[in-house]
């Protein structure tokens, strides 16, 4: 049986950090973190079949999704995995950072939205939403999280 709620394993397009100084490129199971100005390689991570990623607005963190139920949070200064988010029971589909950098929200094929402390990876809240969601976004003040036209209070 094919689960239609799970995204295929397709590498995302190369993405620039919010300030345009760093780039993440994922291809053939390798993730490269690069300094755009100098073209120097910050780090290379092997074995990462990345399907999506997101930068924190301060460019310090990037979360890597790999079509599994966990996600790796990278420290851009070191290029190392800072922690792994564990809690979803099906592949994570999307992630987004709050504008203030305090929170990371993820949604998964397990029909749940999870709120994580972006600095230490601790799960803070879980909402069961009854369907696999493809989009979520924080309000500009980071107080609310919009999920498929519904809003839940952080």
Image: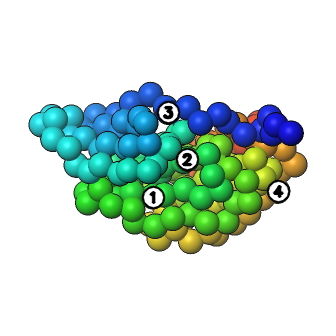
Q: Give the CA separation, mark 1 to mark 2.
A: 12 Å
Q: Earlier in the sequence, mark 1 or mark 2?
A: 2
Q: Is residue 136 visible?
A: yes
Check residue 128 in the rendering and tell me which mark sits there, or answer none: 4
Q: In the picture provided, is 38 more to the left or to the right than 109?
A: left
Foreground disc of the pair 1, 4: 1
Q: Number of marks in the image?
A: 4
Residue 152 versus residue 7 in the image, above or below: below
Report which quarter residue 26 is drawn in: top left
Foreground disc of the pair 4, 2: 2
Q: Give the CA separation, mark 1 to mark 3.
A: 17 Å
> In which quadrant will I find the C terminus?
bottom right
Q: Residue 57 in the image: x percent, y percent? A: 40, 46
Q: Give the CA separation, mark 1 to mark 4.
A: 23 Å
Q: Are dots 1 and 3 in contact, CB under 8 Å?
A: no
Q: Residue 88 in the image: x percent, y percent? A: 70, 60
Residue at 55% over, 32% down: 10
Q: Earlier in the sequence, mark 1 or mark 4?
A: 1
Foreground disc of the pair 1, 2: 2
Residue named by callout 1: 73
Q: Earlier in the sequence, mark 4 or mark 2?
A: 2
Q: Residue 149 in the image: x percent, y percent? A: 77, 36
User: How is colour applied across the structure in the image?
Assistant: rainbow
**Which residue is situated farthest in the top direction here?**
13
Q: Earlier in the sequence, mark 4 or mark 3?
A: 3
Q: Is residue 57 visible?
A: no
**Which residue is situated farthest in the left direction here?**
38
Check residue 11 in the rendering and tell me which mark sits there, or answer none: 3
Residue at 54% over, 39% down: 51
Q: Are dots 1 and 2 in contact, CB under 8 Å?
A: no
Residue named by callout 2: 66
């Amino acid at each position: 049986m094919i689960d239609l709620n799970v995204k295929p394993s397709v590498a995302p397009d190369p993405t620039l950090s919010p300030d345009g100084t760093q780039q993440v490129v994922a291809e053939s199971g390798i993730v490269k973190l690069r300094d755009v100005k100098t073209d120097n390689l910050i780090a290379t991570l092997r074995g990462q079949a990345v399907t999506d990623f997101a930068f924190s607005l301060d460019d310090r963190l990037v979360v890597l999704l790999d079509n599994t139920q966990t996600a790796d949070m990278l420290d851009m200064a070191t290029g190392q995995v800072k922690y792994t988010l564990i809690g979803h029971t099906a592949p994570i589909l999307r992630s987004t950072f709050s504008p203030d950098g305090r929170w990371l929200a993820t949604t998964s094929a397990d029909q749940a939205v999870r709120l994580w402390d972006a600095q230490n990876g601790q799960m803070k809240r879980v909402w069961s939403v009854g369907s696999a969601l493809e989009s979520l976004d924080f309000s500009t003040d980071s107080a609310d999280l919009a999920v498929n036209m519904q809003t839940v209070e952080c």
